[in-house]
Image: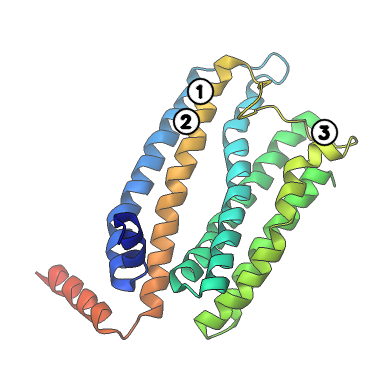
Amino acid sequence: MNPVLRWFHQLGSPPYFDRFAARWAPWGYGLGLLVMGVGIYLALFSVPPDYQQGDSFRILYIHVPAAWMSLLVYVLMALYAAIALIWRIKLCEILAMACAPIGAAFTLITLATGSIWGKPMWGTWWDWDPRLTTQLILFFMYLGVIGLYHAIDDRRAAARVASLLAIVGVALVPVIRYSVVWWDNTLHQGQTVSVFGESKLHASMLPPLVWMVIGTKFWFAGSLLARARADNLYREAGKEWVRKLATGKQRSGSA
């Protein structure tokens, strides 16, 4: 068997995944904090004030990475959910459900920072703008997935029902992404940063944003592994390998 395929096959084993997540989750958190720390430092002390917005524009370095992650995490959640429903892979169920609280957190940060940024720019904390409204709907979609997953006692049945909602909701992602293009009356500014095209953001302002975008990816990886590991242990409670793991921890703690 191909080594990569063998690794993926092994990763589906609950004990193997537990060891994998326990090893790499702290690395994700650590690298995320380190990289985001560099990004925040550069954003506060390296980038000059904006000629129109002054220092208030610096919230961009939290708002934009969080907004991008809110969409990316939802797409990943829907992808894991689809794989889980089609191929009945339990690990993908776990990963899909672990994505939901993380994505909800990123979406909440996006809404909060957008309101804080919008107050001095628009003169109001909230407006039923297409981008803001669809982002709020995305937040409710995340909450719906979380609520469905915890409303049913049978974890596998709950994951299947919640996965269906996640897949249906993925249609909202392109609407959010292109809302500033499709609606001319939007208060939200147009696309400022482009991955493949020309960015409207000044070159001196890009490095901190790049650091923050990378940092949020590492943080997400660590959080996903940690949450998935916790759910995996909950589902496998009572199994011999979990009892051995718990016994080993108790012995090391009492030593």
115 relative to 34 in the view: left or right: right
- Identified at 47% across, 29% down, the residue is 39
Q: Amino acid at mark 3?
A: Gly
Q: Residues within 10 Å of mark 1 (few under 14, many from 20)?
A: some
- Identified at 49% across, 17% down, the residue is 46
4 relative to 250 in the view: left or right: right
Vertical side of 215 occupied by 245: above or below = below
Q: Position of residue 139 (x, y in %)?
A: 68, 57
Task: Using the rendered view, name the quadrant where residue 112 is placed.
Answer: top right
Helix, strand or loop for disc 3: loop
Helix, strand or loop for disc 2: helix
- Identified at 44% across, 47% down, the residue is 219
Q: Amino acid at mark 1?
A: Pro
Residue that mark 1 sits on: 207
Vertical side of 32 occupied by 8: above or below = below
Q: Quadrant of the N terminus?
A: bottom left
In this view of the protein, can residue 48 be seen by the observer?
A: no
Q: Residues within 10 Å of mark 3 (few under 14, many from 20)?
A: few
Q: Position of residue 250 (x, y in %)?
A: 18, 74
Vertical side of 88 occupied by 80: above or below = above
Q: Amino acid at mark 2?
A: Trp
Instruction: State the residue in front, 101 or 217.
Output: 217
Residue 211 shows which numbered tag? 2
Residue that mark 3 sits on: 123
1 relative to 117 in the view: left or right: left
* Mark pair 3, 1: CA separation: 29 Å
Query: Earlier along the polypeptide chain: callout 2 or callout 3?
Result: 3
Task: Using the rendered view, name the quadrant where residue 7 is placed.
Answer: bottom left
* Mark count: 3
167 relative to 1 in the view: left or right: right
